[in-house]
Amino acid sequence: MRYLMLVVADGAASDDPTSDDIVAWVKEMDDRGIRLFGNRVVSPDEATTVQVRDGEVLLTDGPYAETREQMAGFDIIECTDLDQAIEVAAQHPMARHGRIEVRPFWQ
């Protein structure tokens, strides 16, 4: 089953993607065939929110929600079940600094 791991952090993600062994986690999950794809995202102040209301496209600078916690990155993983997805998420270095939201894809 495929899961989205949403990496959530207080403030901007670290400028150093190798910090806290994230590179080692990525390599291990890639080698195990669990991580299918993932990446960091730019800071929320570079986001553009798109809405369509009454046929008009409305753009807003910044994230969709005004909150201190923001998405810092994501990973798409393939696991046998939710228990394995939780084990994988718990090993992600950002689980110690922020949080990892695990969601299965719509079946």
Image (cartoon, grey):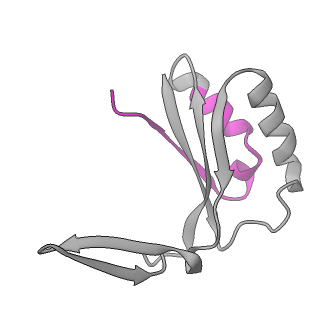
Vertical placement of 25 versus 16: above or below?
A: above
Q: Quadrant of the C terminus?
A: top left
Q: In the image, residue 11 lies at what x, y percent?
A: 65, 74
Direction from residue 65 to residue 38 in the image, left or right: right
Q: Residue furthest left?
A: 54
**Which residue is depicted at the point 82% across and 57% down?**
17
Q: In the image, residue 58 lies at what x, y percent?
A: 29, 80
Direction from residue 63 to residue 100 in the image, left or right: right
Can the viewer see residue 78? yes
Vertical placement of 27 versus 23: above or below?
A: above
Camera-side residue: 43 or 89? 43
Q: Is residue 79 magenta?
A: no
**Which residue is depicted at the point 75% across and 20% down?**
32
What segment carries the magenta color?
Answer: 85-107
Can the viewer see residue 64? no
**Which residue is depicted at the point 11% across and 75% down?**
54
